[in-house]
Image (spheres, rainbow, N blue to C red):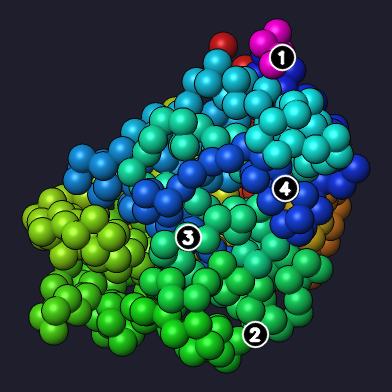
Amino acid sequence: MDNTRSLHDWLEYIESAHTQVIDMGLERVQKVFKRLSLDFAARCVVTVAGTNGKGTTCRFIEQACLHAEKTVGVYASPHISLFNERIRIGGLDVDDATMCAAFSKIYEAASGLKSHNNYSVETISLSYFEYATLCALLIFAEKNVDVCVLEVGLGGRLDATNIIDANIGVITSIGFDHQSYLGNTLDAIAGEKAGIIKPAQRVVIGYSSMQDSVGKILTQFSNHTLLCEQDFGLIQSESSAVASSLSTGWIRVDNTLEHFSLQHTQIPAQNVMTAIATLHFIAQFFAHSEPLLLQHKTLEALINKVNVPGRFEVVSQSPYIILDVAHNEDSAKYLLWRLQQKQFNQCHILIGMLKDKNIEATIEQLISVNAQWYCVDLPAPRGEKADRLQKALHSLNKKSETFNDVPTALKRCVQECQTGDIILVVGSFILASNFMQALLDYKR
C-alpha cells in the first residue's frame, strides 16, 4: 500500500491515469469493485439521477437522515473548492488521510498487485470519476454507514454509481443536457437516466409527464413507485407560474394527505417533495415508526433551513456576490425566479460555461435581468471561450465585456458595482471553483 502520497498527489494521478476524461461504461469499475469485496447488503442505498435537482435532493435526504440519527454517507459531484466536498459522512467532508488510504487500496485492486481476494494480474485503467466513486463506496463500507446517498454523475445506466443495485432509485428531472452522451430527445435522455432502476426496486419519479422510456422500465421491473402529481406534489399558486414559488407540498401516506409549507424553502420546492417521498421508502427500509422518517414539525423546520453550497449562495456581503452553478436552461429559469425575489439596482453577471452546454438557451433565460454582462474564458479542456457567450448576448441585443481569466473579470465587476447592486457568478462548477479562489485572493 502506498502511504507516501498526499491527497494532492493522488488527485494529480487519477486525473491522468486514464486516457479519456469521460469514459462511460461499467465493465472496468465493476471488476475493481469486486476485487475490493465491499458489502452493501445491510445498508440502504439511494441512487439519485436527473438533469437538475440531484444535489439539493441529496442534501435534504442527508439532513433528514441525520436528524433521524442514521449514519449517512453522501457521494456528490462535482466539488467547488476542495475534492473532499464530494464525500461526506455525518454531514462532514471526509478528511485527506481517509481518502488517501482508500485511493491506495483502489490502486492496488486496479493494478492487480495482490494475489488474494480474486485479484488477477490484469491491470485495469480507471477514470477520475471511477476512482472517486470507488473511493466513496470503500469509505462508506469501512465506516459502516446506515444510508448511502449516491448522486449520479452523468446519465445513469453507464454511470459508475450504477455498479450498486440501490434499494431506492430517484429521478429528479429530465431536461436537455449532455446530448452527445445521452441522446437528442427527452425520451432517450430519460431512458439513460432510468438505467439506475433495477427489478423490484423502490422508485421515486420527481417530475411530471414521465417519458415512455421510463414507464416501460417501471412496468417491466414491477417497481414499487411514488410518482409526482399522483403520490406527492405541489399545490399550484394562482399568482405564479414558477413551480419553485409554490407555497404548499403534499404527499399521500397510508391514504392520508400530509401537507408541508414550502414558502420559505431554500432549495427548489419540487426537490423538497421528491426528497420527502424518498424518506418514506427509507423509513420502510428501516421499519421506522415514523412513515416519513421524521415527525411533521421536524421536516417543516428542515425545509426552512437546508441549503446547498453553490446554489444561490451569498459568498460576499461587500460587494454583494451570489454564486450559482446553474448551467442549463431549466436551472437558469429557476435562478431567474430567485433573482426576481431580490431587490437590487443593477445586476453584474459574470458568466463562464462549458462548450457542450446549451449556452444560448441558458443565457436567454436570464436576458430579462437588468444587468451588465462579463463573459470569461472557462479554464478547462471543455471550457468555452468568452467570445461565444458574447455572440449569444449580442444576438439578444445585449452588450458584454470579455475576459481571459476569472481574477480580471472579478476586478472589473467590483469596479463597476455600485451601492445597491449585486454581482451574480453563474454558469459552471468550474467557474465557481475558480471564482472562489479569485475572491479569496482579491480580499487578502
Could you say where residue 59 lies in the image, as x and y percent from the top left? 38, 48
- Amino acid of disc 1: Asp
Residue at (50% x, 75% y) in the render: 199
* Residue picked out by circle 1: 2
37 or 330, nearer to the observer: 37
Asked whether the beta carbons under mark 4 and mark 2 sit within 8 Å of each other, the answer is no
Task: Of the two numbered discs 4 and 2 on the same chain, state the one appearing first in sequence.
Answer: 4
- The answer to whether residue 45 shows anywhere in this view is yes
> Where on the picture, by quarter, is residue 14?
top right
* Residue picked out by circle 2: 187
119 or 296, nearer to the observer: 119
In the image, is residue 419 part of the stretch drawn in magenta? no
Residue count near mark 4 (Cα–Cα under 10 Å), binned few <14, some 14–19, many ≥20: some
Task: Of the two numbered discs 4 and 3 on the same chain, state the one appearing first in sequence.
Answer: 4
Q: Find residue 166 and name its label.
A: 3
Name the element at disc 3. Answer: loop
Asked whether the beta carbons under mark 3 and mark 1 sit within 8 Å of each other, the answer is no
Q: CA distance from mark 4 to mark 2?
A: 30 Å
Asked whether the beta carbons under mark 1 and mark 4 sit within 8 Å of each other, the answer is no
> Where on the picture, by quarter, is residue 97?
top right
**Residue range of the region highlighted in magenta in the rendering:** 1-5
Task: Of the two numbered discs 3 and 1 on the same chain, state the one appearing first in sequence.
Answer: 1
Task: Of the two numbered discs 2 and 1 on the same chain, state the one appearing first in sequence.
Answer: 1
